[in-house]
């Protein structure tokens, strides 16, 4: 697949693919928190189709508010990140679903909602690979809290924007998680 993504660089996409491939033998499904238009979701869906083995077919679950970014908190403030605002990156669930249909790929489980409002029932029982791309402090904090207890042994969580100075809330949320006594799991983190 030729990819075009205005949110994730080509180098980062390659890291995501490489990491997602490592998790193909880990039990559990693949999830993406903050799918936006579905550019990375399409790549993950294709990877799963290309590598599916009848009985152990993995599902892809993707999550988004489909209302754009939430409002920023003080943890997210930075001069470099002024263009990231509540309501930006709006896309509808239907548009994302249609992209999968057009690409001839299986439509993932698509969940609409704020990460803070999702419950355990919205998640797969076991997760082999998670891509967290919610841009803001609360979004990363909440998605980490959701996926950590469900990560399978050997599973990997990729967090986007950890090194992005325009989005300082991401690093804050990850560091808080790493330093917390009650992580709810011990999955490997890959920080982009
Ligand atoms: C940078 S975009 C994701 C890009 C996508 N992962 C890709 O690779 O193309 C961030 C997305 O996260 C969603 N988002 C951010 N925080 C959220 C939250 N707390 N709850 C639900 N959706 C959220 C936004 O609506 C937006 O679509």
Image (cartoon, rainbow, N blue to C red):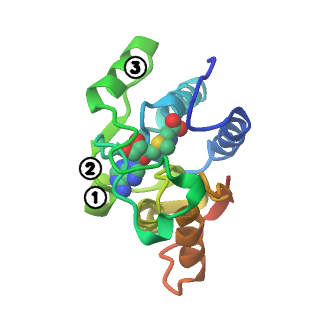
Number of residues whose C-alpha sits closer than 10 Å to that of mark 2, classed few (under 14), some (14–19) or many (20 or more):
few
For the residue labelled by badge 1, is the local secondary structure a helix, a strand or a loop? loop
Task: From the image, tell me which residue sits under label 3.
Answer: 99
Task: Name the quarter where the N terminus is drawn.
Answer: top right
- Give the spatial CA distance, label 3 vs label 2: 20 Å
Q: In the picture shown, does residue 25 fall above or below 99? A: below
Give the x, y percent position of residue 158.
Answer: 61, 53
Residue 91 quadrant? top left
For the residue labelled by badge 3, is the local secondary structure a helix, a strand or a loop? helix
User: Does the numbered disc 2 mark a residue whose Cβ is under 8 Å from ligand 1?
Assistant: yes
- Sequence-wise, the earlier of marks 2 and 1 is 2
For the residue labelled by badge 2, is the local secondary structure a helix, a strand or a loop? loop
Closer to the camera: disc 2 or disc 1?
A: 2
Q: In the picture shown, does residue 176 fall above or below 16? A: below
Residue sitting nearer the eye, 32 or 90: 90
Give the x, y percent position of residue 184.
Answer: 47, 75
Residue sitting nearer the eye, 20 or 138: 138
User: Does the numbered disc 3 mark a residue whose Cβ is under 8 Å from ligand 1?
Assistant: no
Q: Residue at x 36, y 27 (%)?
A: 96
Q: Residue at x 40, y 12 (%)?
A: 102
Task: From the image, tell me which residue sits under label 1.
Answer: 118
- Sequence-wise, the earlier of marks 3 and 1 is 3
Q: In the picture shown, does residue 129 fall above or below 154? A: above
Residue 158 visible in the picture: no
Give the x, y percent position of residue 117.
Answer: 25, 60
**136 left or right of 109 in image:** right
- Give the spatial CA distance, label 2 vs label 1: 7 Å
- CB within 8 Å, label 2 to label 1: yes
Q: In the picture shown, does residue 78 fall above or below 21? A: below
């Amino acid at each position: 697949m030729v990819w075009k993504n205005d949110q994730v660089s080509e180098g980062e996409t390659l890291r995501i693919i490489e990491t997602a491939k490592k998790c193909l033998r880990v039990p559990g499904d693949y999830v993406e928190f903050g799918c936006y238009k579905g550019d990375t979701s399409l790549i993950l869906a294709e990877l799963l189709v290309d590598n599916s083995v009848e009985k152990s077919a993995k599902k892809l679950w993707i999550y988004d508010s489909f209302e754009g970014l939430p409002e920023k908190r003080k943890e997210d403030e930075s001069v470099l990140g002024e263009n990231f605002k509540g309501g930006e990156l709006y896309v509808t669930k239907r548009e994302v679903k249609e992209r999968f249909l057009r690409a001839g790929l299986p439509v993932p489980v698509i969940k609409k909602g704020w990460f803070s409002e999702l419950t355990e029932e919205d998640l797969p029982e076991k997760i082999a690979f998670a891509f967290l791309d919610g841009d803001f402090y609360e979004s990363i904090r909440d998605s980490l809290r959701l996926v950590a207890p469900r990560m399978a042994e050997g599973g990997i969580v990729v967090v986007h924007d950890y090194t992005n100075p325009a989005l300082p809330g991401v690093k804050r949320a990850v560091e808080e998680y790493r330093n917390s006594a009650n992580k709810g799991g011990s999955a490997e983190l890959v920080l982009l």
